[in-house]
Amino acid sequence: MDFRPKNANYERVTAVIDRFLKEGHSDVCSCPRCINDITAIALNYLPPHYYVDKEEKLKAGSPWLMVETAVVEAIGRVAENPNHSHHLKSTRLNDSPGLAT
């Protein structure tokens, strides 16, 4: 059995990021660096909620609306100031006009 502490908000943040990038923020870069930056920024907006066992996990974590708000803010910050020079999703680079394939 794994008794290491885990942050319930980390799991909620990553779930919301995945959903938002698939559903409505497809223009945001989804490279590993940007995803990790979004995750870190969103988690910094939220209080930590640690749990050790699965029963505690069900009760742990910030409200979903709070998590979604933190992720939206983080996506906006990373989109405005990415930590790399390319701003398009790596999967969409070949779809952009003017780029050789």
Image (cartoon, helix red, strand yellow):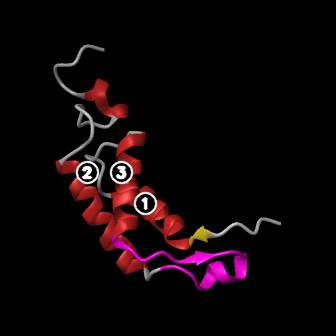
The answer to the question of whether label 2 and label 1 lie on touching residues, with beta carbons closer than 8 A, is: no
Measure the alpha-carbon separation of dots 2 and 1: 17 Å
Q: Residue at x 33, y 71 (%)?
A: 45
Pick the front one: 46 or 68 = 46
Measure the alpha-carbon separation of dots 3 and 1: 16 Å
Which contiguous range is marked in magenta? 45-61
- Residue 56 is drawn in which quadrant? bottom right
Q: Nearer the viewer, mark 3 or mark 1?
A: 3
Q: What kind of residue is marked 3?
A: Asp
Reply above or below: 13 against 21.
below
The answer to the question of whether label 3 and label 2 lie on touching residues, with beta carbons closer than 8 A, is: yes
Q: Residue at x 19, y 47 (%)?
A: 81
Q: Which mark is residue 99?
A: none
Q: Which mark is residue 19?
A: 1
Q: Residue at x 83, y 66 (%)?
A: 1
Q: Which mark is residue 78?
A: 2
Pick the front one: 2 or 64 = 2
Q: Position of residue 38 (x, y in %)?
A: 35, 55
What residue is pinned by disc 3? 37
Give the side of residue 4 with respect to residue 89, left or right: right
Q: Residue at x 30, y 14 (%)?
A: 101
Q: What kind of residue is marked 1?
A: Arg
Give the side of residue 33 with respect to residue 79, left or right: right
Pick the front one: 67 or 40 = 40
The answer to the question of whether label 3 and label 1 lie on touching residues, with beta carbons closer than 8 A, is: no
Q: Is residue 13 magenta?
A: no
Measure the alpha-carbon separation of dots 3 and 2: 7 Å
